[in-house]
Image: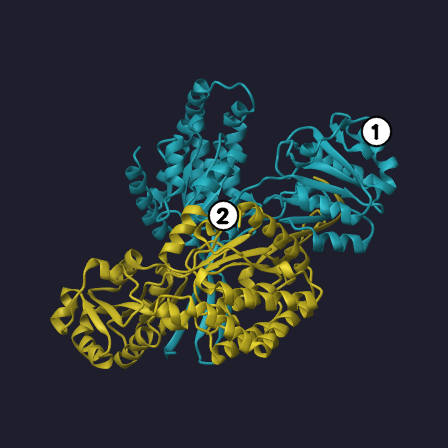
Chain colours: A yellow, B cyan
């Protein structure tokens, strides 16, 4: 696929976006429902195509599991689409309205962003999930998946295109980059007359490629070096439950905790109890931690790492200030929790910690579009521009100024 | 200045931002008022420094006027700061709030972006205006002005730093890149651990440099190839007044109109009347325009250009659809106006034209932070991510999720 072919496809996607932007709530919702039905009706064909991708896939590790579709996973893709279809329409809401002294009627109205480009890795469910969020919010989805999942992705995208056409909407409102090469991905990130927003869903190397090559506005998704700070005033049983949940309920996701910060006043009680509570977790402790429990010595690097595994760094701090400074230094601005019974400390944490989400007496695992009631998410933004934290339907829109007058001039 | 010196300064600015983010409304407002007073008290010193910059400046053209400060311009800088100081605090507003079924209390609260980087050209008033908007909204302002204005900018920034220190806030909340070279500007755009948002205020070459070099999220400011479409049903006197105002009231700004689109049904009446109304404007017309008036033939390029001068392109269209398609092809997504008496056409324009602002029966010149009641603006965004149209205090903030529980785990 040449860059010119990519630009040509991009122009078609852009044209489709402008049609979709004015489609009715009912039409957009109907497309999601039709694709949910098609996923179920054509499940066996989809699994057969997925088997071809799997047969070509060399790696036996976690990547293979991410690539794999099953009956249950297809059912869950269909069900996710039905949830998003049922979510309230995010479009055409009048966000604010004023009449200026000169009589101008000024409103800001929620409209789609336009064309959303998403670069992602193995999981084929992302193809359907992202298309669903985009189409529901009136945006075209322009997708660049991984080479390993190309056949599966093509099959899923074809279901979308059929449903769009059946609804008399343009097929190109959901499109997949045909060439899964690195060169095509770089050219994709530079389609500045096509993409209104680029969302990378992947690891540090994808983020680095995005910073290096992108020529369009992007939202950075999800580095999550999340902390739980156990304050001197914490309810110890609550703190144990929260740290255990934040670390072990799903260690491979971005809202899992990677470091526990423990106030020195309670370290002697809390740390041994924690080791007893989560024996399956390897603790990597600073020198003070090692005074209370038997753990691997932590390097400075351990505090900066997202383990995404059953490993937890631990540091004993002498104050709330020290905990906040540690988070400012090592955190990635995702989700940061305090466990405390002290209202002033809770408020200081909320005010002073700079992150997409700050939590008091709750697990970091709640920072997720579904848990926060967004009805799905296209990613979790750790940048501050546009959207911060889970990006749902509303975060895929922008505001348009609408000014109505009777001949006013300036 | 080495890149390391720049990064070191950047770290100081970032540290200052985190202090400013929790400063009180009163403290932030007080800094603006103090700088307004200082600008007046030290006006003669400021003008003397500005005279040094002017003496070193070779170009006699428009750049010189933009560089020049005068009594009136300093007074206007002070007055702009007082206006922004008086605007309501944009921070700590609870934008939405819910209690989840599991009892979690979830809010989103407006907080500063952090460090705003601004790259701009000659006008030294931008130094003060931008610092004012940033400090009022709790953000650090990290500024890179033009080499020609360096001494003037340093003087103004010093007034800010003195006022910050007097308010017991860190001086580095307003900082100027000491080295005005192109190399330093490129290094500045790549300070990804310092800048939360980059705003370029300048022409196409600055925008191109930003797309090429920036490694941080940015907001693109203001290409304005704005159109006025005069519908078949337009009140002709209203249309003449709006086109004349949009073109001639200040031709050098981004919200000035660059093309008039005229429905064929009224072209024979409207175009001669327009030429008579604005004889000072050079009309560049398509073939159909030339049938009705004596004008320069327009090239395709003329429809794509932002003249920023007393030149207006003109095209006769056969329908609203053709007008909308022309805007989609040549517009830059800034401000697009229709003059019409037909409600359905007005609504179609509002719905279908994709731009930061769409106007019905009003001049494009109203799309400006002051005119829309934002109390100042840091720029006018023509991208869709984050902010679209004039960026005021609220557009310099982001939302932080605040989750409070009683031990909830997932």
Rendered view: B23 above or below B367: below
Q: Is residue B11 left or right of residue B400?
A: left
SS at circle 1: loop
Disc 2: CA contacts within 10 A as few (<14), some (14-19) or many (>=20): some
Residue B366: name its quadrant: top right
Whether residue A400 is visible, yes or no, is no
- Name the foreground residue: A141 vs A365: A141
- Judge by depth and name the residue closer to the eye, B231 or A130: A130
- The spot of residue A78 in percent (x, y) is 55, 76
For residue B293, the mark is 1
Q: Which mark is residue A187?
A: 2
Task: Tell which subunit mark 2 falls on.
Answer: A
The furthest residue to the left: A291
Q: To which chain does the residue with label 1 belong?
A: B
Tell me where residue B101 appears, x and y as whole percent.
Answer: 48, 80
Labels 1 and 2 share a subunit: no
Check disc 2 and report its element: helix, strand or loop. helix
Q: Is residue A291 above or below residue A75?
A: above
Against A410, residue A56 (above or below) is: below
Q: Which quadrant holds the C terminus of chain B?
A: bottom left
Q: Position of residue B34 (x, y in %)?
A: 42, 40
Estimate the spatial distance between the alpha carbons at disc 1 and disc 2, rounded to whole Å. 46 Å
Which quadrant is the N terminus of chain B positioned in?
A: top left
**Residue A375, how many percent across, how many down?**
53, 72
A251 horizontally vs A148: left or right = left
Instruction: Determine which quarter of the picture holds residue A316.
Output: bottom left
């Amino acid at each position: 696929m040449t860059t010119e072919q990519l630009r040509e496809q991009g122009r078609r996607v852009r044209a489709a976006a402008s049609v979709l932007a004015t489609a009715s709530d009912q039409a957009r919702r109907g497309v999601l429902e039709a694709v949910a039905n098609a996923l179920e009706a054509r499940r066996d064909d989809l699994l057969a195509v997925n088997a071809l991708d799997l047969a070509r896939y060399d790696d036996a590790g976690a990547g293979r599991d991410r690539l794999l579709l099953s009956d249950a996973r297809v059912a869950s893709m269909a069900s996710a689409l039905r949830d998003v279809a049922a979510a309230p329409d995010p479009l055409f809401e009048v966000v604010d309205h004023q009449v200026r002294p000169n009589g101008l009627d000024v409103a800001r109205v929620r409209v789609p962003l336009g064309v959303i480009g998403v670069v992602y890795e193995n999981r084929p469910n992302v193809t359907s999930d992202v298309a669903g969020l985009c189409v529901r919010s009136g945006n075209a989805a322009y997708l660049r998946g991984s080479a390993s999942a190309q056949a599966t992705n093509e099959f899923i995208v074809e279901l979308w295109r059929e449903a769009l056409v059946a609804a008399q909407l343009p097929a190109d409102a959901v499109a997949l980059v045909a060439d899964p090469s690195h060169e095509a991905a770089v050219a994709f990130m530079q389609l500045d007359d096509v993409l209104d927003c680029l969302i990378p869903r992947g690891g540090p190397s994808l983020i680095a490629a995005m910073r290096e090559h992108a020529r369009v506005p992007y939202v950075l998704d999800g580095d999550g070096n999340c902390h739980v700070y156990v304050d001197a005033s914490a309810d110890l049983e609550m703190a144990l439950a929260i740290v255990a949940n934040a670390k072990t309920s799903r260690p491979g996701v971005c809202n899992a905790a990677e470091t526990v910060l423990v106030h020195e006043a309670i370290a002697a009680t809390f740390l041994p109890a924690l080791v007893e509570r989560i024996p399956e977790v390897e603790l990597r402790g600073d020198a003070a931690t090692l005074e209370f429990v038997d753990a691997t010595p932590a390097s400075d690097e351990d505090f900066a790492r997202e383990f995404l595994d059953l490993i937890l760094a631990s540091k004993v701090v002498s104050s709330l200030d020290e905990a906040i400074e540690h988070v400012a230094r090592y955190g990635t601005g995702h989700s940061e929790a305090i466990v405390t019974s002290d209202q002033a400390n809770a408020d200081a944490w909320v005010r002073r910690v700079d992150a997409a989400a700050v939590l008091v007496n709750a697990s970091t695992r709640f920072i997720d579009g579904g848990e926060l009631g967004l009805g799905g998410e296209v990613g979790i933004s750790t940048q501050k521009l546009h959207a911060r934290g889970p990006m749902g339907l509303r975060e895929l829109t922008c505001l348009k100024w609408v000014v109505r007058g009777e001949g006013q001039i300036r």
